[in-house]
Amino acid sequence: MIYSMTGYGKASSMKEGRNVTIEMRSLNSKGLELNMKFPAAYRQYEFMWRNHINNSLERGKIDVSILIEETQSDITNTLNVKLLKSFLTQLNEICDETQTSKNSVLDGALKLPGVIQNSQESNAEEVKNEIFELLNVALEEMKAFRLNEGHVLEQEVVGRVTLILSYLASIEQEEPKRTLVIRESLQDNLNTIQNNANMDTNRLEQEMIYYLERLDITEEIVRLKSHCQYFFDILKEDIGLKGRKLAFVSQEMGREINTIGSKANDKDLQKLVVQMKDELEKIKEQLNNVL
């Protein structure tokens, strides 16, 4: 079971005088990129929300929007008299010291932060709990979406790894024919060389061993089968993050396929190698979106 990094979640609630909507989207990313948008009155809760989302989603480029709508009739403004008096005292003292007119001191003080508060700011603590509950609902919806997408991705990569194994089986079937052709070619060359009186027997044996080792693909076939099986085993593991692990195994699969191609020296085997490479590239593209 794997999870996709692509996901979507939404939750909303409607209470008297207030509508709260949380919407989140997720795309693939190398790490975790979290962007949040919400009213400034709730800035103090950002760190708590970020930590909760980070622990739940772990990876992906995630956009979270928290929208709070209140009807105009329910939005009231409250004057913070204590804070206003403090500002006025300080401003008047500055005017006295700088011999500046005090005509606009009150207007200026009323515009300072915190002097006038609306009901949205004063209700922030009450709404915080409601937002946290909705956030959990949206996160669960996001996880369910990711799981469904992951199921589709898993079917895709399993099918392509299975194709690679079928192409590898064809290579194993063709291998005896290739070996026979190589043997006959070497035998012809040996017959030619043996007629040469100046032949260096030791050098000939070394060259033959080197040539045969370079053409032998048995080890690569065994390793590629092992990597494919390990790929399937990872998919069955009960762990959350599998994308990086699967990507690493796919790289190792690529190494063995490339080595088989470089050693093949046979047009039929080369065609099969090209087909395996094509399937592997498609697998890597899909793994870019696996959590």
Image (tube, rainbow, N blue to C red):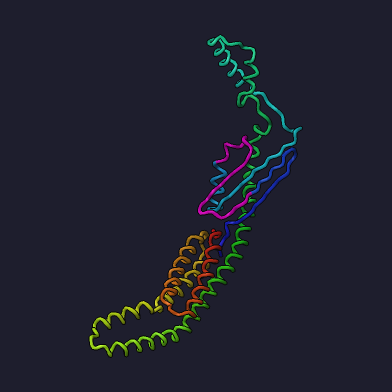
Whole-percent x and y of residue 92? 58, 13
Query: Which of the two residues, 182 or 167, is positioned nearer the viewer here?
Result: 182
Question: Would residue 284 appear left or right of 123 to someone viewing this image?
Answer: left
Query: Which of the two residues, 218 or 67, is positioned nearer the viewer here?
Result: 218
In which quadrant of the rendered image does the N terminus lie? bottom right
Question: Would residue 230 appear left or right of 63 to someone viewing this image?
Answer: left
**Total count of labels:** 0
Q: Is residue 44 magenta?
A: yes
Q: Does the magenta stretch include residue 16?
A: no
Where is residue 219, by image quadrant?
Answer: bottom left
Residue depicted at x 44% and y 71%: 258
Whole-percent x and y of residue 134? 65, 47
Whole-percent x and y of residue 99? 56, 9
Asked if 276 appears above or below 242 in the picture, the reply is below
In which quadrant of the rendered image does the C terminus lie? bottom right
Residue depicted at x 63% and y 19%: 108
Asked if 110 appears above or below 268 in the picture, the reply is above
> Over which residues does the magenta segment extend?
24-46
Residue depicted at x 55% and y 71%: 160
Residue depicted at x 57% and y 60%: 3
Query: Which of the two residues, 179 or 25, is positioned nearer the viewer here?
Result: 179
Query: Which of the two residues, 98 or 4, is positioned nearer the viewer here?
Result: 98
Asked if 247 appears above or below 257 in the picture, the reply is above
Whole-percent x and y of residue 268? 49, 80
